Amino acid sequence: MTLEEIKALVARGSYHYSKKVREAIEEGFFDEEDMVHCIRSATKIQKKEKDELGQAVHGMKYVILGKDTHGQLFYTVGKVIQAPGGRLYFYISAHQAD
């Protein structure tokens, strides 16, 4: 899976996120638009790791660094999964980059 393919999924709104990410949003650490902006502003996939749960379409998780809506570095980990309506980008983790 390329960054361009992930960007296309996110641009179409074809994404979902984990309970951990939802809780961070609800607690006000960041919002959904920060995650979208991170993917849109990224220039490369920083790291690929094996999806130990075996749910990812290509068996991989992707670490992507970009910028949030305030221009700050933002970190996400996600994977592409097959859902009933098609492929989705699933955010596993997201937060401000250190």
Image: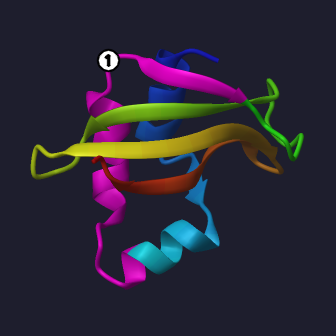
Packing grade of label 1 (10 A; few <14, some 14-19, many >=20) is few
User: Is residue 26 a member of the stretch shown in magenta?
Assistant: yes
Q: Would you say 58 lies left or right of 70 here? A: right
Q: What stretch is highlighted in magenta?
A: 25-49
Side of 50 where 42 appears, left or right = left
Judging by the rendered image, the residue that carries numbered circle 1 is 43
- Badge 1 marks a residue whose secondary structure is loop
Q: In which quarter of the image is residue 42?
A: top left
Q: Quick one: which residue is furthest to the left in this view?
A: 70
Q: Where is residue 94 in the image (x, y as percent from the top left)?
A: 44, 55
Q: Closer to the camera, 13 or 93?
A: 93
At 44% from the left and 32% from the top, the residue drawn is 64
Image: 5 above or below 32: above
On the image, the x and y values in percent for residue 46 come to 45, 22
**Residue 95 found in image quarter:** bottom left
Whether the magenta-drawn stretch holds residue 19 is answered as: no
Q: What residue type is labelled 1?
A: Thr
Reply above or below: 59 against 91. above
The residue located at (38%, 44%) in the rendering is 75
x and y, in percent, of residue 22 in the image = 51, 73
